[in-house]
Image: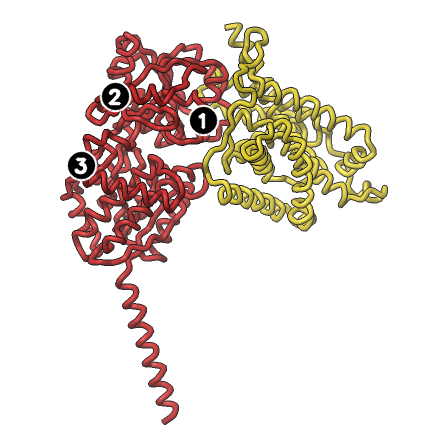
Amino acid sequence: MEKIFIELLINGIVLGSIFALFSIGLTLIFGIMKIVNFAHGEYIMLGMYASFWLFSLMGINPYLSIIIIAPLFFFIGYLSQKFVIQPILNSPMVAQLLATVGLGIVMQNFALLFWSADPRSIQEVFIGRQGIEMLGVKISYEELMAFIIATPMNICLFIFLKYTKLGKALRATSQDMQAAKLMGIDVDKIYWIAFAISSASVGIAGSVILPIYPVNPTIGINFGLIAFVVVILGGITSINGTFITGIIIGIIDSFSGYLLPSVFKESSFFIILLLILWFRPIGLFGRALA
Amino acid sequence: MKLSKKIMGSVVVIILFFCLSTFGYSQEIKVGSVHPLTGPRALPGIESHNGTEIAVDMQNSLGGILGGKRIRIVKGDAKDPEAAASETERLISTEGVKIIFGTYSSTCGAPAHQVAGRRGVLYFENIATEDTLTQRGNKFLIRFNNKGSQIGEMIADYSANFIAPMYNKKPTELKMVVVRLNDAWGTAIGGTAVKKSKEAKINVVGDFPYDLSVIDFKAMLIKIKSLDPDVIVFNSYATDGINLMKAARSIDLKPKAIIGSGVWACIPETGKALGDDANYIYDIESGFGVNPKYISEKAKKITAEFEKRYKEKFGVEPPSNSYLAFWSAWIALHEILTKTSELDTQKIRIIASEIDISEKDTNTGMGAKYAPTDHPDAGHNLKSTPIVRQRFNDKLYVVYPTKFAVCKGQKDPGWGKKKVSDEQIINWLKEMK
């Protein structure tokens, strides 16, 4: 029983780091631009496909493909912000929601049109190597890599936002857009940078997730839903909150998957979300609004 | 005078226009094809549509249906139950179809059948397996494929009578876990597998329904591992099936046999994801590839023609769903819809009840005899039967029922030891001869 507890805990932490990895980007957009990006999951899906095709056609290891995918998705994020998000920034919220939902549907159908509905998967990147053993529990190298990449990514983003001039500008814009403008911050530039960084981080997440899970055009819906729970629970503007909450959600997912009937597994973290928001509407690590 | 000449000329043109368009219309008949073409069921949905399309092409080359009319397919995208209903309605109201082929999915098929049934439109259901589809009194529904309960029963039958003895166990000593989708299809197959396995005295130690939205299965599989099952049934679609297998391997979950029921067990993508570890999976459902010695020359010719056309048109070997959808549509088009020239759905329904196609006349192990409208399972194919196949090097070999088998079922050696050589396969095939 003790071994199972440890196995579930380690599985939950690793799973949670994966959740955090693909949720961090949403925190940036949500927190800075106040845009609910319903296409977030589809960016993850495209990131997985990009990594898949680089591996299948050119033999590039998914972890090395990050070098290509990060700048590529940075550019894709820039284009998305310029041509889809920017025009609707001052529109009613319904228009913004519909725009991102529409973007998501276009991306899904793009994937379906060009790559079909076939699930795409790669064999484990470290073929023949079974993984490491920690406290009697086996962890695959692919899952370990997800944890290893998520943690420094979170740290780098935290340092960037906290200590760099651009990071401070991003935080200022998230706190008060009008005041940021008055202070001479180019808010339009901040917005595309935020979206581009978010997109790049999601592209990286896709590369890291692909060795573990197969991809198909509709997989983004599942990831996107979890990302929203993690971000809301973490406190919309908090990068650290997103990382920690991702781990918490991963652990909840792991234990509920073991203890509860499978059909209740997905609802367990939604129930936790509702309970926490009941007592703390700004999320676990969110700042109270002025 | 000039004006009246102009008017006369216009009237002549208009009359000619209608005559010509009517002439063209009477030589063609539109049929609907309602399948999931987008969404999570798109892979098997498109495969099913493609099988239907080849059947239509082949019948057109033989002179069409209903007195020589050329068949034209109009597609509907049944990506979810609501879309299935609305697309069926659109095809009937806007396109005027009276015959529909579909749907692969039970969840999407059910509302589509209802819409068609209310409008007196014939619906040839190719693959959807939920038992109750043919128990709702819909006189215009005809289903070629097995019911889910038949597949569930076969899972129990094969496990008790072949897998248990393979490991010198009695059924009571065989521990089984069923992992299934929490929808109509999963309940039909996986739910029945649980029920029938218990009736066969198999020790069912777990029943794990899950939602299609689940990404990570490890926690559930850790629980399953603690139950130490001998047999695990993964009743899943494509992505979730592959996900389950990868997760099972990652935690070293080692049952004696893995039974797949669902598209994941037979698609090439499973081989790409798992490599040699995709070998030895059992696929228990409707399929193709029965022993050629058992089937008629007529069936061999039709199969060869289908396979040739499929590969030419779509560039790949036809998958299981395409074979099933093909035979369902082919029997409808060639054996039913050529027996009358009238598009009278009541009359056609009676003709459908009168056909009796031998199981030797298809390569699926199934014949076709559709229950009449006063039968409790009106429209169901009384000659449907699932088959058991085992996967080696991305091909599936029929192992049961024995009369259809090309080789015997083989013991699974476990993760990392599942490499199979061509020589081994040849020897197994020879053993059956």
Q: Which sits earlier in the primary sequence, circle 1 or circle 2?
A: 1
Residue at x-position 24% and y-position 42% = B302
User: Disc 3 marks which amino acid?
Assistant: Ser
* Nearest to the observer: residue B32 or residue B388: B388
User: Which chain is tinted red?
Assistant: B
Residue that extends furthest to the right in the rendered view of this protein: A183
Q: Which mark is residue B430?
A: 2
Q: Which mark is residue B242?
A: 1
For badge 1, the amino acid type reads Ile
Q: Residue drawn at (29%, 40%), measured in percent from left and top? A: B126
Tell us which disc is closer to us: 2 or 3.
2
Residue B388 image-quadrant placement: top left
User: Which chain does the numbered disc 2 sit on?
Assistant: B
Task: Report whether residue A278 is seen.
Answer: no
Q: Which element carries disc 3, helix, strand or loop?
A: loop
Find residue B354 and name its label.
Answer: none
Same chain for the residues under marks 2 and 3 in the image:
yes
Viewed as shown, does residue A252 lie left or right of B142? right
Q: Name the residue under label 3.
A: B296
Query: Residue A247: image x %, image y %?
Result: 62, 20
Mark 1 is surrounded, within 10 Å at the Cα level, by few (under 14), some (14 to 19) or many (20 or more) other residues, namely many
Marks 3 and 1 sit apart, C-alpha to C-alpha, by 36 Å
The crowding category of the residue bearing disc 3, from other C-alpha atoms within 10 Å (few below 14, some 14 to 19, many at least 20), is some
Q: Which chain carries label 3?
A: B
Q: Are marks 3 and 1 in contact (CB under 8 Å)?
A: no
The location of residue A143, given as percent across then percent down, is 58, 20
Q: Determine the image quadrant of residue A181.
A: top right
Contact between marks 2 and 3 (CB within 8 A): the answer is no
